[in-house]
Amino acid sequence: MYFWIINISLVFLLCVFFAGILIPKILLISFRKKLFDVPDERKIHTSIVPRLGGIAFKPVIFFSIALLLGVNLILGRPEIFAELEANVAELSFGFCTVMILYLVGMADDLIGVRYRAKFVVQILCAVLFIAGGVWIDNLYGIFGISDLSAWIGYPLTILVVVFIINAINLIDGIDGLASGLSGVALLSYGLAFMHLQQYIYAMLSFATLGVLVPFFYYNVFGNPEHGRKIFMGDTGSLTIGIMLCFLSIKLSLYTPTRDTFLYNPAALAFSPLMIPCLDVVRVFIHRIRMKKNPFMPDKSHIHHKLLALGMPQRKAMVTIVSLSLIFSLCNVVLSQYININLLLIMDILVWTGANIWLTNKIEHRNLNPNYR
């Protein structure tokens, strides 16, 4: 146990350290090559900001894990290699999907990629998950369904992968929001995998969390006037999105026992992603009702509503991330005592009610200029 705690801590610290070195270099290159996210009427930022922060994510994660593997080999500690061997198919195909989406994201940030092409690539990544054995084979009581056949589980896995990736991509609207929500999910997954003694996945969770720490600092606290602010871009959101897909679906495959914990695996795996997923569903329904293209960006996300009420960006980000943490904890704990379908209905009602309340507050504010 201590061996794994040391390795997990080291991979987290290595990722924080290397990402902290690499991100300033990316900032320097972005300014020299004029690779910026230029403000427009839809965007919230008012200064030119580099959008290539996500370029640091995949290389730092892979390098840090590979470095620890080498160090363990030199020190004659084979435990980590036994864990890798037991999960070699899943990890091999999983790393391939990260590489593919990382390259697609980089191409999108530099020259642009049509969303239809991105959908095709995301479906390919889901197929690779399935090839590696990571697919949804049980709904654990959702809609009264438990075990799933491959004929249902495979298409469902593809749908879930595409949905989660785009949910993370679309929620990336204000400073620190996507990285903050992803950080909450990664911390949850890392602790859950440690408890389940699936340590290689705990390492992967904390490694990904590690690269988000320095990025979050530059994204939230960086001063654009001094050239210290950066966005993750599609490279970052797609990379983090596919990592969250891989970890969440893998976590949903565990079988609860009294030796581990009796929380519903579906609640444990997908509750940390509840906020971005519910927000995307609501936004898509809203755009369709307004007879707009559901894939075209607008200002109907939850963070846009908070900003419309006059809430500062940072406060809006902290509010949404805190809500995500509360949703995650409540769902996981209550899944021991409440039927998963009732829990899901409660989540939807709470989220819908919160959005209706925000909409009414915004309308009241617009009708009353002196409203505070």
Image (spheres, rainbow, N blue to C red):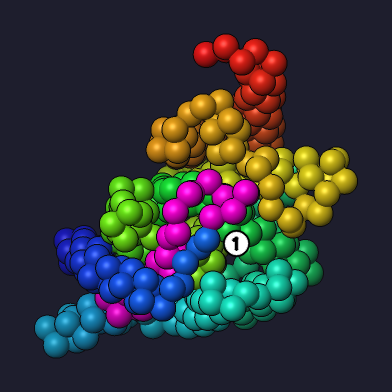
Point out residue 59 in the picture as x, y percentages from the top left corner. Answer: 36, 78
What is the crowding at mark 1: few (fewer than 14 residues within 10 Å), some, or many (at least 20)? many
Q: How many marks?
A: 1
- Residue 202 is at least partly visible in this image: no
| Residue 56 sits in quarter | bottom left
Q: Tell me which residue sits at (33%, 69%) in the image.
A: 27
- Write down the region rendered in magenta: 39-64
The reply to whether the magenta stretch includes residue 60 is: yes
Point out residue 108 in the picture as x, y percentages from the top left corner. Answer: 58, 74
- The answer to whether residue 71 is left or right of residue 186 is left
- Residue 177 is at least partly visible in this image: yes
Placement of the N terminus among the 4 image quadrants: bottom left
- The answer to whether residue 285 is left or right of residue 242 is right
* Residue placed under numbered mark 1 in the picture: 165
Q: Tell me which residue sits at (56%, 26%) in the image.
A: 309
Residue type beneath disc 1: Ile
Point out residue 283 in the picture as x, y percentages from the top left corner. Answer: 71, 43
Q: Tell me which residue sits at (48%, 49%) in the image.
A: 46
Point out residue 314 in the picture as x, y percentages from the top left corner. Answer: 40, 38
Between 355 and 222, the residue placed more toward the observer is: 222
Between 243 and 137, the residue placed more toward the observer is: 243
Question: Of all residues shown, which one is farthest toward the left?
Answer: 75
Between 101 and 196, the residue placed more toward the observer is: 101
Q: Tell me which residue sits at (17%, 82%) in the image.
A: 71
The reply to whether the magenta stretch includes residue 262 is: no
Q: Secondary structure at mark 1?
A: helix
| Residue 73 sits in quarter | bottom left
| Residue 208 sits in quarter | bottom left
